[in-house]
Image (spheres, helix red, strand yellow):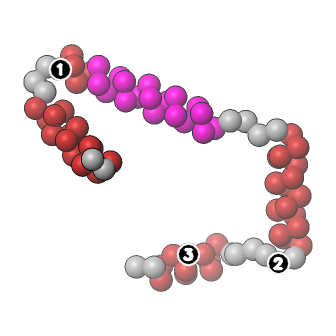
Amino acid sequence: MDIQTKKLHFVQEVLRIKDEKLIDKLNNILKKERKKKLEEELKPLSRETFDNMIDEAESDSKNNRLTSAGALKKDIDSWS
């Protein structure tokens, strides 16, 4: 079963629930799992990594490897 099918089945089951406490429990589980996932993804940068990112950004600026906000907006507008 693919992820979309699993989500659809899950939503259908949730819609059948009449017990508000159970809905609250499921909601709390979802919040906790999202928070845990976010904390796993948002690990602090080391000083060395941060410094390297700054150096790369400065190099991009000096070598004209930038995209202006206006050009980016124009590109995005052309997508639709």
Residue with the mark numbered 2: 64
Residue with the mark numbered 3: 73
Q: Which residues are magenta?
A: 25-42
The kind of residue on which mark 1 rests is: Glu
Helix, strand or loop at mark 2: loop
Q: Residue at x 18, y 33 (%)?
A: 14
Give the answer, above or below, for where 52 lies relative to 34. Answer: below
Of helix, strand and loop, which mostly describes the magenta segment? Answer: helix
Residue 20 in percent (x, y) is at 17, 20
Hey, which residue is sitting farthest top in the picture? 21
- Is-magenta flag for residue 38? yes
Closer to the chain start, of discs 1 and 3, is 1
The kind of residue on which mark 3 rests is: Lys
Residue 57 in percent (x, y) is at 82, 62
Closer to the chain start, of discs 2 and 3, is 2
Residue with the mark numbered 1: 20
